[in-house]
Image (cartoon, helix red, strand yellow):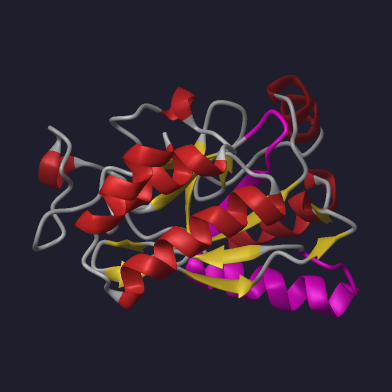
């Protein structure tokens, strides 16, 4: 593996953004302990490189080869991937021991953060994609999520759940020609990133999704 990594280093183009993606992927695995896998990326013009092309609902921001099941915390594997594919988005495999997430349209996310601040409730890490805000939460099981939702009578279609078996692109990846960013970055404490439970955020996000509905049905990140 050491010899292979050495060969890969000679193939890099030295671009600062490329090194930024590698450094970010290594920080995610080393400092935060989250499993990642390369995203498929986009062709010039923003077309997804997968067979769905322009019809892909998450263009460039999903795994393909390697598949999602290959997500790892192994730093040597992460370096191998991003040395050979320096422009590829960083994709988090959600669930299990990794964070899950709840996402809403960007306008609803901004409203939700303001409301949480008014209530004195810390949201934890929050990232902005080109069209949505995603709030990272403690890992949850689907059965647990079902119980939480059943008590609320209805959930707006604009509220999406990134749980076990799911994925989420992470900053500073560029997808759709735009770079993702942290609205509120992860803050490790005693070797782990502190995440809120989903139940703490759910009522506000349900209200946000109903107050600021999604425009159209295309998911797009």
The N terminus sits in image quarter:
top left
Q: Position of residue 139 (x, y in %)?
A: 74, 36
Q: Quadrant of residue 127?
A: bottom right
Using residue 61 as the reference point, say whether residue 180 is left or right of it: right
What residue is drawn where x is 56% and y is 48%? 159
Q: Image height check: is 220 above or below 178? A: above
The reply to whether residue 219 is in sight is no
Q: Residue furthest front?
A: 3
Q: Image height check: is 60 above or below 4? A: below
Q: Which residues are magenta?
A: 95-123
What residue is drawn where x is 63% and y is 47%? 101
Using residue 166 as the reference point, say whether residue 42 is left or right of it: left
114 is within the stretch colored magenta: yes
Q: Quadrant of residue 4?
A: top left
The reply to whether residue 107 is in sight is yes
What residue is drawn where x is 66% and y is 70%? 185
The total of numbered circles placed on residues is 0
Q: Residue furthest left?
A: 44
Q: Position of residue 5 (x, y in %)?
A: 36, 44
Q: Quadrant of residue 182?
A: bottom right
What residue is drawn where x is 12% and y is 32%? 51
Q: Position of residue 129 (x, y in %)?
A: 44, 64
Q: Position of residue 196 (x, y in %)?
A: 82, 53
88 is within the stretch colored magenta: no
Using residue 155 as the reference point, say whether residue 36 is left or right of it: left
Viewer-proximal residue among 107 and 153: 107
């Amino acid at each position: 593996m050491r010899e292979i990594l050495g060969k890969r280093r000679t193939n890099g183009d030295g671009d600062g953004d490329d090194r930024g993606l590698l450094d970010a992927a290594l920080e995610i695995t080393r400092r935060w302990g989250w499993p990642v896998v390369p995203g498929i990326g986009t062709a010039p013009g923003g077309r997804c490189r997968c067979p769905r092309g322009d019809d892909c609902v998450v263009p460039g921001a999903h795994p393909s080869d390697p598949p999602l099941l290959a997500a790892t915390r192994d730093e040597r594997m992460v370096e191998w991937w991003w040395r050979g594919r320096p422009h590829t988005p960083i994709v988090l495999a959600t669930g299990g021991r990794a964070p899950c997430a709840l996402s809403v349209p960007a306008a609803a996310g901004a409203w939700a953060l303001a409301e949480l601040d008014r209530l004195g409730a810390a949201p934890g890490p929050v990232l902005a994609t080109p069209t949505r805000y995603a709030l990272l939460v403690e890992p949850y099981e689907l059965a647990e999520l079902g119980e939480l939702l059943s008590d609320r009578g209805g959930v707006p279609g604009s509220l999406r759940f990134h749980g076990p078996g799911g994925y989420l692109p992470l900053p500073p990846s560029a997808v759709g020609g735009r770079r993702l960013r942290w609205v509120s970055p992860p803050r490790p404490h005693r070797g782990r990133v502190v995440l809120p439970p989903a139940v703490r955020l759910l009522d506000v996000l349900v209200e946000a999704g109903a107050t600021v509905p999604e425009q159209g049905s295309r998911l797009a990140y």
